[in-house]
Image (cartoon, helix red, strand yellow):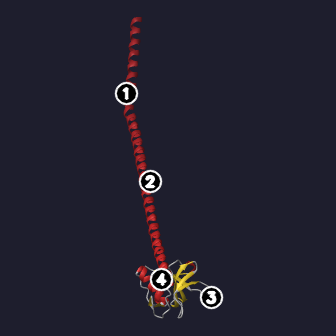
Amino acid sequence: MKMTNSLLILTAAVSLFGATVTTASAATIQALPHQEAVQAAHDAVENHDSENKVASTSANRSDQTADTHSATANSTTTSHAATVTNDGETANSSRGTAVVNLAKKLAAMNIPYVWGGESLKGMDCSGLTDYVYAHVADIHLGHYTVTQESKVTKKPVSQAKPGDLLFWGADGGTHHVAIYIGNHQFIAAPQPGQNVGVETISSAFMPDFAGTVKE
């Protein structure tokens, strides 16, 4: 009898243990799909973040490249503009030097003032300036002071550079013109009875404005 009871108890225990194991296994099996879904979602988030980081890095590099190209283009443009400006100033300076040199040669040749003249035999003020620019730069200013006004870029006398023209009289109504040679001096064909020569700017005979001859 005792033996039979023991067997019954053992059988019941084994059955209970099997049920427990079966229940645990079922729970584990049921949990697996949920865990896989969670893991898949986690992986998807990580992949999305990674793609965003790559896209952001690529965009930043593109912006940096664009900024570099823009800076290079601006630098090139600025450099080109500076070169053009410097070339223009150099050309004007070179022409001005040539104008001054020829004017000085004429001033040393005892050329008399002749009204309406424009040759080595005689010159008036506008004839002198027209002669010099025609021979140095092939620029014909015209044989009249007002006409020559239209051929220059006007400026104050204080800003005159060697080779510029000096004008006496109101804008549009000038009556005398000369060639500025620097150091407050100019070369002109002054008046009848005098020769082409070097003179100094003074308060007694102050020019009203200056002008750089246009190309």
> Residue 123: horizontal and vertical position, in percent?
47, 90
| Residue assigned mark 3 | 204
Residue type of the residue flagged with mark 3: Ala
Q: Are marks 3 and 4 in contact (CB under 8 Å)?
A: no
Callout 3 environment at 10 Å: few (<14), some (14 to 19), or many (20+)? few
Residue 8 at what x, y percent from top left?
39, 11
Q: Earlier in the sequence, mark 1 or mark 2?
A: 1
Cα separation, mark 3 vs mark 2, equals 65 Å
Q: Residue at x 44, y 56 (%)?
A: 68
Mark 2: amino acid: Gln
Nearest the eye: 135 or 171: 135
Q: Please give the name of the residue rendered at 41% of the width and 46% of the height, measured from the top-left corner.
A: 54
Q: Nearer the viewer, residue 186 or 36?
A: 186
> Mark 4 or 1 closer to N-term?
1
Residue at horizontal 43 percent and vertical 46 percent from the top: 53
Q: Secondary structure at mark 2?
A: helix
Q: Which residue is mark 4?
A: 152
Secondary structure found at label 4: strand
Q: Secondary structure at mark 3?
A: loop
Q: CA distance from mark 3 to mark 4?
A: 25 Å
Residue beneath label 1, please?
Answer: 26
N-term mark: 1 or 3: 1
Earlier residue among tags 2 and 4: 2
Depth check, mark 4 against mark 1: the one in front is 4
